[in-house]
Structures are given as structure tokens and as C-alpha cells.
Amino acid sequence: MGSNTIFPEVSIIIPTYNKSALAIETLNSIASQSYDNWECIIVDDGSTTEDFTALESFAKLDKRFSLFKRPLNTKKGANACRNYGLSISKGDYIQFFDSDDVMLENCLKGRVKAIEATTLDFVVFSMGIYHNDGFKNDDTPDVKVNDWKTALGEFIGERRLPWNLQRTLYRALLIKERLLFNENLSRFQDVEFNIKLLSQLKPKFKIFNKIDCVYRRANSNNPRNKSFNKHVFHSMPIFLESIHTQIPVDILEQKRGNMQLWLLNLIGLYADNSVEKSQLNKVICVAEGKLHLNSKQKIILKLLFLSKTKLKGIKGVVRLNSYLRKKYLKLMA
């Protein structure tokens, strides 16, 4: 390319909350990108003064970084931060990213190159996890889909989330002033956003089987929020209500069993003493209508919740949970 070539600008939008040490590693991976025409909009969700000051000091080192506080008139949460970042972005492309993940050196360069010569609305790349001295694909092979309707079904399919926000580069014209994140959701944000995008905008896209960014799992250095499990239960009914306004009836009917299993798995994984029974009741009330749960399934879910919250550590409880799961799966057959 000639010296007068104008490269499109990428707006990278990152919500952050009390993770300055990890966030600075993430920001360093952005500063080290081989593609240099980007702006990085960091939106803080109410971190401690110490954390915010650390980010502020880093952002001053490079004018392409800008640090903002989430507006006080918006709801607390990463989604409000993303919406605000999107509203002030100036780039030709939008890259949402999390403050505890890492871009490999050619991440932006490869994504821009993949989309620039096409009429695609977005491109999706693979995300890795650290493995020995390198990386491997994040948990399972990518789900490869070629059209919006097939992708829509896979977002509630049996295999996995086809793609999350970090893996995707969107054209700004596709989403800006056309689509927002649901600020009532504290979990399942990626799924709900992409379901709305696919359903409402019917975009053209392509998936590339190349790892160009890295996911950092929750651990002692990257702990989950203490309210994580409560947020899962709070978000389940909101998510179910939302997707049932977006996904065509034929796909919902086809994938209902997957969603019933999703519900069982989430209750089994995240029910603990921090979750109130009223939250479970709200989940089951919404799921009864949206997922067509029968009375036996509802009883099993309530028993599983009781087992996970009140009987943990008692002899025989593991066997009980296994029995409940098998009974539930038989009712799905």
C-alpha cells in the first residue's frame, strides 16, 4: 500500500471494574498491535479511586486511549458502559473487548484485512486459552455457520456459543444507533446482543478459524464477582423473555430441548446460598411459559435447587443430584 493510503479506524470499547492490573495487561496488548489506527474507549463502572487512578495514569501515555466514567444516569454494569462507549465512538469499525482478555499482535490487522475487501457486516475470529507455552482453541472447536438464521439457532443450540464479543469486528454502520446492549442483563450479554443483531439486522458475516486473541479464565488473579451466581439467576428470566421476542417460532420449537437443558445446567452450576428462593421462582415462572416446562420438570428443578443450597456436603447428595438430572432428561425425551 502507498504512503497516502488511509487506513480505517477501529473503535475498541472496554468496560472495566476494579481490575486495573489485568486491564493494563489488556491495554498493553492493544498498544502493541501491528495495526495502529485505533481508538480505545475505556469506560469505568465505578472502580475504587486506586484502580481508576492506575488506569488514568496508563491512558495518559498514549492519546489513542481515553478513559471515562459510566454516566451516573445509567445503570451500573458492563452493558451500560458498552452502550456509552458505542455512543461516543468515532471509528469505522467497532471492537468490543473485555478488560481481562488479551489481543495477539496481529489481531486488529487480520480482522480489518478480512473485512475491508468485502461487503461483509462483520467477521469472527477464534479465541484461545493459554496452554503450555502457546494457545489452544477456547474449550471446543468453533461452530461454523454461514448465514444469520443458522447462526441464530446455534446461539441456543446444544454445542456452544458460536462467538462472543471479543471475537467479532463489526462495521460501525451496522450497529451504531441501531442496536444497544440490554442494561437489565448482567449475564448472557454476548448471546442476547448477537441474537438481536442476527434477528433484527440479518447481517452477512464470515467466521475465520484463526486464534487472534486470548481468554483468561476466572482464577485467584482474576476472581469472579461475589455476586456472580445471583446475577446469573437474575438474568435468566430477562434473557428468556428477550430471546422469545427475537427468535422465530420454528427455531424456538426446534431448540426448546436445548434451552430446557440449559436451564437445568445453570441451576445445577450456580445455585448456592447467595441465591434467594424468590429468584428461582421467577426463573421457573418465566421458563414454564417460554420453555413449556411440565409440572414434573418444575419439581425436579426446585429439588435440585434445594439440594445445591441446603444439602451441600451431606452424604448421598451427589447421588441425589445425578438421579434428578437423569429424571429431568427422561422427561425431555
Image (spheres, rainbow, N blue to C red):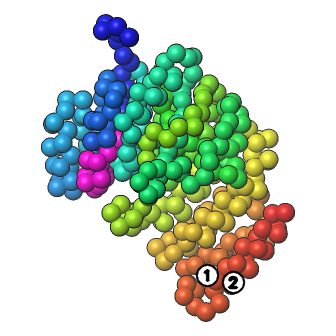
User: What residue is shown with label 1?
Assistant: 307
Task: Tell me if residue 78 can be seen.
Answer: no
N-terminal label among 1 and 2: 1
The three-letter amino acid code for the residue at tag 1 is Ser
Task: Tell me if residue 100 can be seen.
Answer: yes
Q: Is residue 325 above or below residue 204?
A: below
Disc 1 versus disc 2: distance between alpha carbons? 8 Å
Residue 210 x, y percent position in the rendering = 53, 37
Magenta residues?
Answer: 14-26
Quarter-of-image position of residue 201: top right
Quadrant into which the C terminus falls: bottom right
Residue 35, labelled with which disc? none
Q: Nearer the viewer, mark 1 or mark 2?
A: 2
Residue 309 x, y percent position in the rendering = 55, 79
Q: Tell me the element at label 1.
A: helix
Task: Count residues near mark 2 (Cα–Cα under 10 Å), then give few for <14, some for 14-19, many for 20+.
Answer: some
